[in-house]
Structures are given as C-alpha cells and as structure tokens.
Amino acid sequence: MRQALEDSERISELLKDAKLTQDWAGKVGQASVGQGQGFVGQMQQVAGVIASREAFEAERDVFYVELGGFDTHADYRDAVATRFNDINVALTTFVAEMKAQGVWDQVAVQSVSEFGRTIATNGVGTDHAWGGNHFLIGGGVNGGTIHGQYPELRVDGPQSVSGSGPMLPTSPWEAIWKPLATWMGVEDTQLAKVMPNLHAFKDGIHLPKDVFS
C-alpha cells in the first residue's frame, strides 16, 4: 500500500510537467456530463504519460481506459448516440495529440467489451449477446479493413443463436491479440503462454496476418 501511494505521488508530480498540444479542457466540455467527460479525461491522462515517457523511463506501456453506459436494455438509441459521441471526441483529440507528439506510428488503440448485444429489439432496447464488432486504430495499422466474416443480420440466419438475435462470433479474441502481441514485441515462442488457446485457431482462417504494416 505504501509503495502504491508513493508511486501515485510520483506519477502526479511527473504529469505536472507534461506538455500537451490539444485543447483538452475544451474537448471535455463536448462530451456528456459524467462518464463521457471522465473518459475524455482518461485519454488526456494517457496522453500526458506518453508525453512524459522519458521521465517515466518507459519502453512499452499498456493503458486501460473505461467507458460505461452501454446497458441498452431500455434505451438503445439515446445511449448509443451519446456514448459514440463521447468516444469520437476522446479518440479524435487523442489521435491529434499523438500525431503532434510524433508518436502516432508507435501507438495502437483497441476496443474491448465483455459481451455484445442482440440484433433484435426487446421492445424498448437490446439484450445481452455474444459476438460484436471492434475497432483497432494506430499509425502502424493497415486501416480500412474488415477482418473476419460479417454475419447475416437476421434472427433466423446461420450465425444467429436464437430468435432474439445473439450472433456467434466468426473470429476469436486471438485474432486481434496475436498481431497486437507480436507488434508489442512478444516472440513467437512466447505466444502460447500469452494466449493458451491460440493452438485451436489457424492462420489465414481465424488469424489475420496483415493487421500492421
């Protein structure tokens, strides 16, 4: 506990000298009150740590930021519109910041969620499901590519599990974690330890090879 408090104090002192180029305070005001503004603030702090990377003596860093509010059981349209705007504000500012710092080619941002949503409505919103879409952005990413197979969006389609429309994923999480891990410097001989289920999926079918340039 003492070490954690000391580290937190040290980080706060280092971040005071972080020089950022974007109007982060103004961008915070463009996000929704509460979680949205908090999310923009989290991205600002990540940008500050990256700007202070020499002081932190960092070679590689992994940051986790969080945005809630996607519980769309009863309010799909407004909730998604609000949260997507929050994400857009945060990422647009972050990308501009990374480019201004000259490190965009060394940064990758991956979305993650514990579950998807049904394609059919429950009458007022959507319910929990399995498969979903995710994005990966970064200066070294081969953008504009959809990996995996886009499902047939109908409740009686081949990827639909039931009449409410939870969709079976066509790609495993390993499909993105393998190229990300390799890009981060994980050796091929270490991949099985990082992803113990990797052996169950084949390159070219489930695991794309052209994610990064």
Image (cartoon, rainbow, N blue to C red):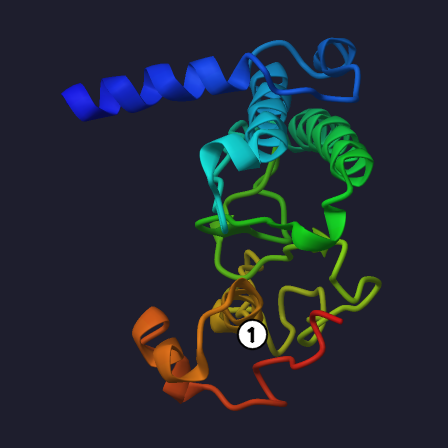
Q: Is residue 126 above or below residue 47?
A: below
Label 1 SS:
loop
Q: Is residue 72 visible?
A: no
Q: Amino acid at mark 1?
A: Ser
Q: Against 159, is 66 above or below?
A: above
State whether residue 182 appears in this view.
yes
Q: Residue 55 at x, y = what percent?
A: 50, 30
Q: Is residue 105 left or right of residue 72?
A: right
Q: Estimate the x, y position of residue 164 in percent, counting from the top left.
A: 55, 56
Quarter of the rendering containing residue 81: top right
* Disc 1: which residue: 171
Where is residue 197 drawn, in percent x and y? 35, 78
**Badge 1: residue crowd in 10 Å (few <14, some 14–19, many ≥20):** some
Which corner quadrant holds the C terminus?
bottom right
Q: Considering depth in this image, is 141 or 18 the residue closer to the camera? A: 18
Q: Position of residue 94 (x, y in %)?
A: 72, 33
Q: For the point 38% across and 84% down, which residue is it?
A: 189
Q: Residue at x 35, y 70 (%)?
A: 194
Query: Would you say 213 lies left or right of 171 here?
Result: right
Res 154 quadrant in image:
bottom right
Left or right: 144, with 124 as reference point: right
Tell me the residue at 79%/15% (across/down).
23
Quick one: 108 or 204, which is closer to the camera? 108
Q: Nearer the viewer, residue 26 or 59?
A: 59
**Number of marks present in the image shown:** 1
